[in-house]
Amino acid sequence: MAAVLPNVPEALIGLLATASIGAMWTISSPDLSPAATLDRVRQLEPTVFIGSDGYRFNGKEFDQLEHMEDVLAGLPTVEHVIIVRTLDPSANLTAYRLAFDEMTARTVAPSYERLPFDHPCGCSSPLARPASPKASSTATGACSSRRAKVRV
């Protein structure tokens, strides 16, 4: 699963949902260009994409729908698109787009996959932009170990 989201709770929810089923997660900042976003996301060949209609920063609103469509045009593997409606919660979505808030409005029993310690969970790319950044993955167990160290 790939996401292009600002710092919103839905980003963490997406990460946890992805990890619960054993899928790979990567997220990119919405202020990167579509080309820079694709450099970081395309190599994962995501089938699910989470984007937002925009974000607010320093009192200004930034519409992201065109940016998201440019990114999606470069991701032929995406089968499902989920939109976080940050700027206009009542906006109608185009065909084949799911609203994050509508998806989470109903209660569903969680399901979890038991995975080996070294199962890949997250993927990140360096912020500095060489020709094409190579993504590095983090194992599920490594994430859990780091979280346990922080608690101690």
Image (tube, grey):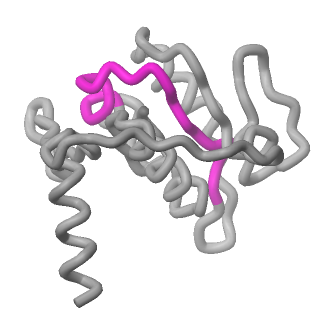
Q: x and y percent of residue 11 in the render? A: 52, 54
**Does the stretch in magenta take in 53?**
yes
The quadrant where residue 44 appears: top left
Q: x and y percent of residue 72 in the render? A: 50, 21
In the rendered image, the residue lying farthest to the bottom is 152
The quadrant of the image that shows the N terminus is top left
- Please give left or right for residue 127 compared with residue 103 in the image: left
The quadrant of the image that shows the C terminus is bottom left
Q: x and y percent of residue 76 in the render? A: 43, 9
* Total residue callouts: 0
Give the residue at x 55% y 54%: 13
Give the residue at x 68% y 72%: 59
Residue stretch in magenta: 38-55
**Does the stretch in magenta take in 37?**
no
Give the residue at x 86% y 38%: 91
- Please give left or right for residue 48 compared with residue 53 in the image: left
The quadrant where residue 94 appears: top right
Give the residue at x 48% y 14%: 73
Q: x and y percent of residue 52 in the render? A: 63, 43
| Closest to the observer, 99 or 127 | 99
- Please give left or right for residue 97 compared with residue 19 in the image: right
| Closest to the observer, 72 or 48 | 48
| Closest to the observer, 98 or 111 | 111
